Image (tube, rainbow, N blue to C red):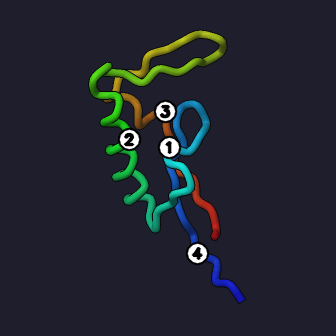
Amino acid sequence: MKNNKTQFYVVSPDGFSIEREKTHDTPKLAWVSFEDWKDRFSRQGYYSTVRNGQRIQIPLGELKAYCIVKEINS
């Protein structure tokens, strides 16, 4: 019998996990991973996405507010 273990991952403003096939043991660790992911956009200074058919640029200081942590049982 397999034990279910709750895992966590961050969803980007585009609705996709920020990491392929990787989850974390706690929400805090998922947010630490988010900070590393966010650093990839530091050179351009924003995260670009499309909302309601319009391209928007999310300042990196506001990016966390556009992301969510989801949990899954594995």
Please give the residue where the numbered disc 1 appears in the rendered image.
Answer: 18
Which is in the foreground here, disc 4 or disc 1?
1
Is label 3 in a helix, a strand or a loop?
helix
Q: CA distance from mark 4 to mark 2?
A: 24 Å
Name the residue carrying label 4.
5
Q: Tag 4, which secondary structure?
A: loop
Residue lying farthest to the top in this orientation? 54
**Outermost residue, left direction?**
43
Q: Position of residue 17 (x, y in %)?
A: 56, 45
Q: Earlier in the sequence, mark 1 or mark 2?
A: 1
Q: Nearer the viewer, mark 3 or mark 2?
A: 2
Instruction: State the residue in front, 8 or 36.
Output: 36
Of tags 3 and 4, the one toward the viewer is 4
Q: Marks 4 and 1, Cα distance to the nearest angstrom?
A: 20 Å
Disc 3 residue crowd, few under 14, some 14–19, many 20+, Cα 10 Å = few
Residue at 38% across, 59% down: 29
Residue reaching furthest right? 1
Mark before the other along the chain sequence, 4 or 2: 4
Q: Secondary structure at mark 1?
A: loop
Residue tagged by mark 2? 37
Q: Amino acid at mark 4?
A: Lys
Q: Amino acid type of disc 3?
A: Tyr
Question: Who's the residue at 28% across and 28% down the image?
Answer: 42
How far separated are the C-alphas under marks 1 and 2? 7 Å
- For the residues labelled 3 and 4, the Cα–Cα distance comes to 26 Å
Query: Marks 4 and 2: which is nearer the front?
Result: 2
Residue 38 or residue 59, whichever sits in front: 38
